[in-house]
Image (cartoon, helix red, strand yellow):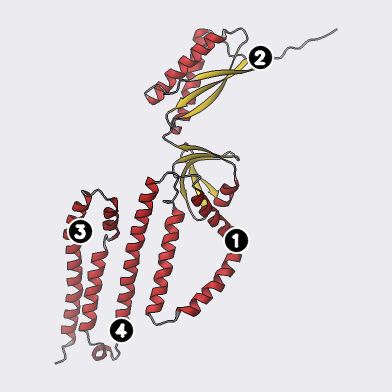
Amino acid sequence: MQASIEEQAIFAFAFIIGGLFLGLILEIIVFTRFRRIIGKAKWKGAEIIVKAFRGIPILWFMLLGCYGAIISIDFIFLFGIDASDILIKILFILFTLSILLILARATRGFVIHYAGKTEGALAATSIVTNLMSFIYLLLGFLIIIQSLGIDITPLLTLLGVGGLTVALALQPTLSNFFAGVYLLASREFKIGDYIKLDTGEEGYITDMTWRHTIIRPPARYDIIIPNAKLSTATVTNFGVSDKETALSIPVGVGYDSNLNFVEHVTIDVALETVKQVQGETPSIQPYIRYHTFSPSSIDFFVNIYSKNLRDRAKIRHEFIKNLFERYKKEEIDIPFPTSVIISKK
């Protein structure tokens, strides 16, 4: 006996609501408890896999409910055409995309986890995660085309010819992309390294995309550097921000100064400044090195070690202020440039 339109609609609605309800129950109760168990496990990969499935059970049960709704409806009786096959294929496409989403999440999680444990890795950058997303998107597209009964062989041929045309049209973009891949493979930098280019730009590496690398100076603005430029530039890598680093500050004193006393006072000020800024004395003691008899002063460098790169500008700032006040107190002369003019009559 053929069910009425109202009965079919009720059955279809019940399947959809039931699938949604079961999905919510599984997500809230079962997965919540499973996450607690995983949280106590020592293997980080279990947590990554659980996060990859977040929200997916709700989608799967919704798809299952939609499938029940489709098979409970007589499309020929209602609409005169059998649309069930098309709708079931759409459900299969959505299920396939959900599988690819799980794989993409899990892959990204494992890559970031690996990058965090590997010295010299830039694997967690946007260029890697975006490339993985593109690969999964392309794979999903091909699976969908194949599931619709379309032969993908001509399509692959068309993609090959079209890819060559696109490559010729996007040479600058592709050069930046492959330069970024080269920088990743060479492991010359990693996220958090403080670098300085020969053109003067400097800062912490915060990310690398398919086109450019982003570095952030202590002033907290971003500098966008094309990957192709970075790969050919002369770069000074100061390392990660939590490593001890030295800064040299040029100073000059008058010719009538007691150099031993100047050295003692300067080092004392340097020690006090580092302790003032960082709360502790440096593990490597500051020192000075005289290097030049200038026309109006004896010049030297003060070498101070900072616990991290972030405090370099602050230490320089406070040291110059403190040294100026201490030199005035100790009557150490910081001379102005002077010139002697000899006039012959």
Sequence-first tag of 4 and 2: 4
Which amino acid does the dot numbered 1 rest on?
Answer: Gln
Q: Secondary structure at mark 4?
A: helix
Left or right: 181, with 255 as reference point: left
Locate residue 152, reporting x and y percent: 45, 78
Q: Is residue 156 above or below residue 208?
A: below
Cα separation, mark 3 vs mark 4, equals: 33 Å
Cα separation, mark 1 vs mark 3, equals: 47 Å
Q: Quadrant of residue 87?
A: bottom left
- Badge 2 crowding class, 10 Å Cα cut-off, few under 14, some 14 to 19, many 20 or more, is some
Q: Secondary structure at mark 1?
A: helix
Farthest right residue in view: 345
Q: Secondary structure at mark 3?
A: helix
At x 33% / y 71%, what residue is drawn? 96
Sequence-first tag of 1 and 4: 4
Q: Secondary structure at mark 2?
A: loop
Evaluate if marks 4 and 2 touch, with contact meaning CB atoms under 8 Å apart: no
According to the image, label 3 marks what residue? 31
Number of on-image labels: 4
Sequence-first tag of 2 and 1: 1
Cα separation, mark 4 vs mark 2, equals: 92 Å
Q: Quadrant of residue 289?
A: top right
Label number found at residue 342: none
At x 55% / y 51%, what residue is drawn? 227
Q: Quadrant of residue 64?
A: bottom left
According to the image, label 2 marks what residue? 296
Locate residue 290, reporting x and y percent: 59, 17
Evaluate if marks 3 and 2 touch, with contact meaning CB atoms under 8 Å apart: no
Which amino acid does the dot numbered 2 rest on?
Answer: Ser
According to the image, label 1 marks what residue? 171
According to the image, label 4 marks what residue? 85
